């Protein structure tokens, strides 16, 4: 009987000391502290344009420290490139690399309200568009906004902006001069 109690006690002791770990979530939401969009005139005539949104503590907490307007020239075609960073780490983590690696699970959605502005995504995951690269065409002079949303759509990406979770949702003032 003593041996049975000793064996049970040892078994419980070993089970209690066994280390348990939770496997990492491969689709854990990343912190995006900086959103940068660079515009290059496809004809090489107009100067390059950069607009940055920076919120160093992420969503909530303190207000963004930078939220630029987008100022483009009328009747111009721009090639745009988006860079996403987590600058809470040193060195900064380039989140756009992860979005590109997981392209089949991400989609950038563009909704300009400035009259005459259209946006076309120019990169893809092989099946659906992605949006880290895009083409912006401006029309006449006008003002509005450009809403840019990064959707995380694991298992539900279908080319539309409806399914999935929102990783970032920004509305930039958009001026066409």
Image: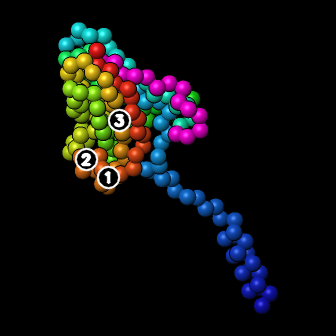
- Residue count near mark 1 (Cα–Cα under 10 Å), binned few <14, some 14–19, many ≥20: some
Which residue is at the front of the view, 10 or 19?
19
Q: CA distance from mark 2 to mark 3?
A: 14 Å
Q: Identify whether 64 is placed above or below 169.
A: above
Number of other residues with Cα within 10 Å of mark 3, as a class: few under 14, some 14 to 19, many 20 or more = some
Q: Is residue 22 left or right of residue 129?
A: right
Name the residue furthest bottom.
Answer: 1
Q: Residue at x 29, y 36 (%)?
A: 111
Q: Position of residue 86 (x, y in %)?
A: 50, 33
Q: Is mark 1 in CB contact (under 8 Å) with mark 2?
A: yes
Q: Is residue 156 above or below residue 117?
A: below
Residue 65 within the segment the image draws in magenta? yes
**In terms of secondary structure, where does tag 2 sit?**
loop
Determine whether, in the image, residue 121 is placed left or right of residue 93: left
Q: Is residue 153 left or right of residue 85?
A: left
From where the camera sits, is residue 18 visible?
A: yes
The quarter in which the N terminus is drawn is: bottom right
Q: Which numbered tag is attached to residue 160? A: 2
Label at residue 174: none
Magenta-drawn stretch contains 75: no
The structure residue drawn at horizontal position 43% and vertical position 22%, both measured from the top left corner, is 68
Q: Give the number of marks.
A: 3
Q: Which residue is mark 3?
A: 148
The answer to whether 12 is drawn above or below residue 129 in the figure is below
Tell me the crowding category of disc 2: few under 14, some 14 to 19, or many 20 or more residues within 10 angstroms, Cα based.
some
Q: What segment is highlighted magenta in the picture?
A: 59-72
Q: Residue at x 27, y 21 (%)?
A: 142
Residue 47 x, y percent position in the rendering: 30, 10
* Residue denoted by label 1: 163
């Amino acid at each position: 009987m003593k041996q049975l109690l000793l064996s049970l006690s040892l078994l419980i002791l070993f089970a209690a000391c066994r280390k348990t770990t939770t496997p990492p979530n491969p689709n854990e939401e990343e912190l995006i502290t900086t959103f940068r969009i660079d515009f290059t005139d496809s004809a090489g005539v107009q100067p390059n344009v950069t607009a940055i949104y920076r919120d160093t503590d992420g969503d909530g907490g303190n207000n963004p420290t930078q939220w630029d307007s987008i100022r483009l020239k009328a009747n111009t075609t721009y090639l745009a490139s988006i860079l996403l960073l987590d600058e809470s780490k040193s060195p900064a983590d380039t989140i756009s690399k992860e979005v590109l690696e997981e392209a089949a699970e991400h989609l950038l959605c563009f909704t300009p309200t400035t009259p005459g502005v259209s946006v076309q995504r120019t990169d893809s995951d092989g099946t659906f568009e992605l949006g880290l690269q895009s083409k912006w065409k401006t029309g006449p002079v006008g003002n509005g906004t450009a809403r840019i949303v990064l959707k995380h759509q694991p298992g539900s990406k279908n080319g539309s902006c409806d399914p999935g979770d929102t990783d970032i949702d920004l509305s930039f003032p958009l001026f066409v001069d």
